[in-house]
Amino acid sequence: MAKPAAPIQELTRQYGPHLNYAPAGGWRAESTHPYSLVKTHCCFCGQQCGIQLKVRENQVVGFEPWEEFPFNRGMLCPKGVKRYLQNNHPDRLLDPLLRSEQGFRKATWDEALDFTARRLGEIQERYGKDAVAVYGGASLSTEKSYLVGKFARVALGTRHVDYNGRLCMVSAGHAYKPAFGVDRSPLPWSDIPKAQVLLIIGANIGDCAPITTDYVWRCRDNGGKLIVADPRITPISRNADLYLPVRPGTDLALLMGLLHVVLRDGLEDRQFISEHTSGFEAAAEAVQPYNPQQVAEMTGVPPQSIEKAAHWFAEAERAIALHAKGIEHQSKGTENCAAVINLCLATGNIGREGAGCAMITGQGNGQGGREHGQKCDQLPGQRSIDDPEARRHVANVWGIPVEQMPQKGLTAVEIMEAIHRGEIKGLLSLCFNPLVSLPDATFTREALEKVEFFGVIDFFLSETAQFADVVLAGSLHEEEEGLGCTAEGRVIHIRKAVDPPPNARQDCNILCDLARRLGKGRYFPYASTAEILDELREASRGGIADYYGITYDKVDRQMGVFWPCPSLDHPGTPRLMEEGRSFHPDGKCRFTLTRWRESGDPVDADFPVYLTTGRVVSQYLSGTQTRRIGELVDQYPDPRVEIHPRLAAAHEIKQDDWVTVTTRRSEVTLQAMVVKTIRPDTVFIPYHWPGERSANRLTHRTLDPHSRIPEYKVSACRLRRAASPPQWWSERGANGDRISSTPAIAIIKERR
C-alpha cells in the first residue's frame, strides 16, 4: 500500500512534465548535417496519419510530410507536426526505477524484472490468480496489444486484463457488433466526400480528428449538406447547414425523434428493410412516442430543426452519419450508437459508396487495440472469450490446454473498483494513466494507495506511475516495429525509426522477459515483432477481424490493408456490408431496440448546470506526451471553463475570472472562457490535466451497462466565482510556464 514515491513537487522536478522546444542536439543546418527519412505514422489519434520522420545519429530530429499516403496526403494537425519532440525528451525514462525511501532509484534490469516477477507471483500464490490485473493501452501497436492479452492469460493466468480503449470507442463496438456482427467502421473515409448529406453527432472533428475535416469540406464542395448535433458550436459546427444544439445526455432522444419523423412521413427504405434487416418492427414501435415536440422539450433542439434533419437525411440518395465520444461517453452510449445505426438501416444507408455510418475512433490504435485480445471479453480476431470454439482455436495456437484459458474478466473501471475493495492486490500497467483518465479521480487515488504491488511499463513517468513500486523504461512508438489500425479500418505499418536509449527496452521484450521469469517463457519465444505478427495472423485466422492475409510487405505495397483479409492474395475489404450483407450467419443487419433512461448524475436544484468534458486540438488524452511538448502547451497552457455569457452573468463571472466548479464528488477552480458557442445551461472543461486541474475529479463512475464505459459527457454541477486564484496557479512561473529547478534541462522557451 503506497502513497506517491516522493512528494509530487519533487517527482515533477525530477521527471517532469518539462517543456521541450527543440530536437536533440538543437537545430542544425541540414546541408551539413544530413538525415534519413523513415515513412511511418503519427503516434496520436485514431487517424494515424502518414508522416516521414527525420533521423540523424539514431535520433528523431524532425519530420517531412508524406504526401503519397492516401489518408492525409501530407496534412498534419499541430500534434502531428510536433510529435517528434518527444524523442530524446529530457523527461525520457532511461533506466528501470525501483521505489525507495527517497523516491525512486535506478535499478538494473535483472533487479527490476526479478522484483516484478517475484511480487506478482507472491500475490497470486497468496490470493489466487485473479488477484492480479493487467492494464494495456490503445496506443500500443497491434502486436503489443495481442501480447498483452496473451501475457495476462498465459504468463499470469489471470482473467483480469483490459485497456484504456475501454474509455474510448467500446460503446460503438457494443452497438456495431449486434447490428452487423463486426466492430469496425463500415466505410472508408474516401466515401465521405461522396455523401449528399452528412450528419455529425457527438464528434468535435476540428479538435479531435482534424484531418477528417478535409473530407467534410470536400463533401460540402461537392454540394453535400452538413448537419451537426453538439452542445457546443465546435469549429466544424460553424459551417454547418443545420446545427442541432442538443442538451448533454439527450442524444438518444434526438436520434429516436429523427427516426420517428422518417417513419411517420413514410421516408424509410422498405425494400432494404425487408431484404436486408431484422428487428425493424420493435425498433419502430420504440420511437413512436418521440414526436418532434416531445423531443424538443427533452433535447432543447427546435422541433422544426428535427423535422428538417430527418427529411434531409432520409431523402438523400447517399447519407452518412459520423459519431464519436460525445455520444459514446454516456451511460446509454451503446443505445446512442445503436440509434445511429437504426437511422441508417431504416433509410437504406449502409454498404454503398457514400452511404453508411462510421465511428471516429479517438485513440492511436483504438481500432487495432480492440481486435486481438487485450479486452477482458475478447480473444484474437474479435472472437468472444465466451465462445467455446474460439477458446479452442486460440488455445491451440498458444499451445495451452483449453481448460487453462481464463474466462471473461473485469473492465478497466471495474478493475480499479476491485482494487479499491481489496479484491485485486496487484496491477501491471502499460501506457495507461488512470489517475488522469478514469472518472472520479479521488476514488482512483484511494485505490492506488491500497494496491499491494503496482508495476508500470512506460517511457515517461505519468501521474499514475508516481505511485508505482517499479517502473520499467519502455519504448516509444518509433522504437519498435508493428502494425496499427486506423479509424477507417486500414491496417498500417509503424516502422522502427530509431533504437530505444541504451538502457531502455522495447515493450515486447519486457513482457517476454517477464514471462520467462514467471516460468512461462516457452510460450513467448519471439525474436522479433514479425514473429509475434505471424502468430497473431494464425490466431485471428477465420475470425471476424481476420489478419491472416496481412504482412508488413503487403501493407507497404498497398499503403494499408483493410481487414478482414483472410488470405495472402486477398486485397482487403475497404467497405463492409456491401449489398446489405452483414457478418451474421443469416447475412441480415439487425435493428436494435433502444430505450430512454436518464443520466447517472442528473441536474437538480443543488446542481443545476450540465458539465461536459472533452479534448482540445493541441493536447491528447491524459497529456502524458503532449504536456511535455512546449509549443503544444503554449497553445492551451491550462484547462479553462467554457461558459455562455448568459450563465456567466447570472453568476457575476467575467472573462478570465476564477470559477469554482463543484459536483457531487469534488471541485476544481479554473479560469473562465466566456463564449457564445455553448448552450447557456452547460459548461465545458477539457480533461488533459492532472491534480487540481483535473476535470476527472468532477466526473462520476456511472457505467454503460453494456460497454462499461464511464459517463464522462454528462455530470451535474454548480458554479461560483472564486475570490482568488487556486494554489496550483501560484506554484507556476510568473508567466504561467511550468519551470524546472534543474538548470541542466533547457525547458524555458527563449524570450523574444
Image: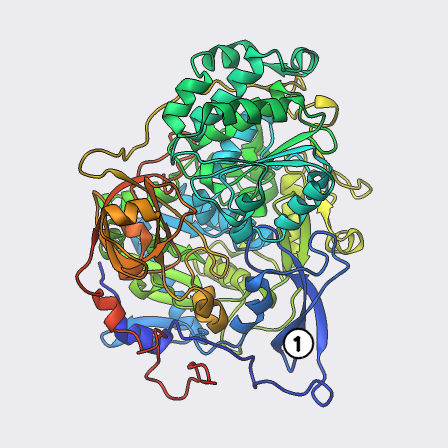
Q: Identify which residue, 430 or 662, lies in the foreground.
A: 662
Residue 116 falls in image quadrant:
bottom left
Q: In this view, does 293 lie to the left or right of 277?
A: left
Q: Can residue 279 be seen in this view?
A: no
| x 39%, y 36%: residue | 330
> Visible in this render: residue 716?
yes
Q: Quadrant of the N terminus?
A: bottom left
Looking at the image, residue 604 lies above or below residue 160: above
Residue 740, x across and y down, in percent: 35, 80
Q: In the depicted view, which residue is nearer to us: 299 or 494?
A: 299
Instruction: Give the image location of residue 513, x and y in percent.
Output: 49, 63
The x, y position of residue 247, in whole percent, is: 39, 34
Residue 496 location, quadrant: bottom right
Q: What element carries label 1?
A: strand
Q: In this view, does 625 lie above or below 389?
A: below
Instruction: Return the residue nearer the eye: 432 or 143.
Output: 432
Badge 1 local density, few (<14 within 10 Å), some, or many (20+)?
A: some
Horizontally, residue 68 falls left or right of residue 632, namely right
- Residue 100 in the figure: left or right of residue 493: left
Q: Which of 218 and 631 is in front in this view?
A: 218
Residue sitting farthest toward the right: 569
- The amino acid on which the numbered mark 1 sits, given as a three-letter code, is Val
In the drawing, does residue 508 fall left or right of residue 348?
left
Residue drawn at 50 percent across, 78 percent down: 21
Residue furthest out toward the bottom: 32
The residue to which callout 1 is attached is 55
